[in-house]
Amino acid sequence: MASPTTSPERKPYQKIADQLRDYIVQGDFKPGSRLPPERDLTQLLGVSRPSLREALIALEIEGGVEIKMGSGVYVRALAVDGKNKTVTLGESPSELMQARALIEGESVILACLHGKKSDYRYLQDCIDAMRASIKNGLPPLEDDRKFHHRLAKMSGNSALVRIITGLFDERHNPISAHLSKHSENALTWEAAVIEHEAILRAVANKDVLGAQTSMRQHLSSSENRWLEALEPEEVNATGRRK
């Protein structure tokens, strides 16, 4: 007898988006109003800041809220009856970055051991191409991908290449891609390039500890740049931004 099919476990951002939608549908948060501060919402819902921010991105994709950078999150009229649930929009961006830091932070050890001059030249070419794209006002995502793919390839482990490339390409899932629109700009990409340079220096010097540290710091900083972009500026009693 076949076992019953089980539904995949819902991701934290889906559950939190459902909770927020319930508050909106019930009238606790009125259309046109600004949602309470993030610290209040995390306490109200009992959730982490990264998961809350991902839930807000999910709601914005659905049309339930509008995120205004430097101002806050505003409720929009929802064409739902409260029974709708947030569909999966891809893996959690913060979890993706944590997974990448864990895996690439280890695979870079093998890149240090197996790297050749031709690899270092290729990685430098990727960095140079990223800088050129930024100068021309273009997102250097493809050369960013080439940089991480080459490091994975330098490990000599095809399984690692497949896993690392797959995790990187999750950037194109709906929630990560939408988050990127809010967070990525010339300044954030320039910071990423500087971090790439630190990784390359360590790998070329076969500095295993330095390469691990640089890679993990890069991916942790990337996660922070993604999520902190949603945090509105603090406003003082006069209504001016601090």
Image (cartoon, rainbow, N blue to C red):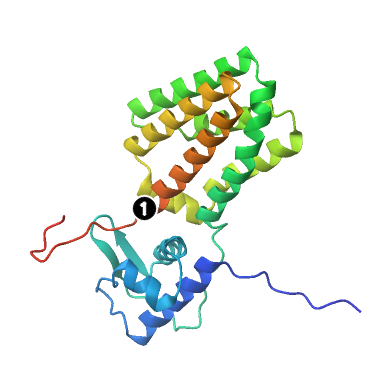
Disc 1 residue crowd, few under 14, some 14–19, many 20+, Cα 10 Å:
some
Identity of the residue drawn at 31% across and 79% down: 29
Most foreground residue, 47 or 176: 47
Identity of the residue drawn at 52% across and 75% down: 85
Where 210 falls versus 236 (above or below)? above
Query: Residue 149: x percent and y percent?
Result: 61, 32
The N terminus is located in which quarter? bottom right
Whether residue 240 is visible, yes or no, is: yes
Query: Residue 90: x percent and y percent?
Result: 56, 57
Considering every residue shown, the one lying at the far left of the view is 238
Q: Residue under circle 1?
A: 228
Considering every residue shown, the one lying at the far front of the view is 209
Whether residue 79 is visible, yes or no, is: no
Does residue 80 appear to the left or right of 159 in the view shown?
left
Please tell me in which quadrant of the rendered image residue 60 appears.
bottom left
Where 59 falls versus 21 (above or below)? above
Does residue 2 appear to the left or right of 72 in the view shown?
right
Considering every residue shown, the one lying at the far top of the view is 117
The C terminus is located in which quarter? bottom left
Please tell me in which quadrant of the rendered image residue 235 appears.
bottom left
Where 137 falls versus 56 (above or below)? above
Judging from the image, what secondary structure is the residue with disc 1 in? helix
Query: Residue 152: x percent and y percent?
Result: 65, 32
Does residue 35 appear to the left or right of 109 in the view shown?
left
Identity of the residue drawn at 11% across and 66% down: 237
Most foreground residue, 187 or 204: 204
Amino acid type, residue under disc 1 in the picture: Glu
Most foreground residue, 53 or 107: 107
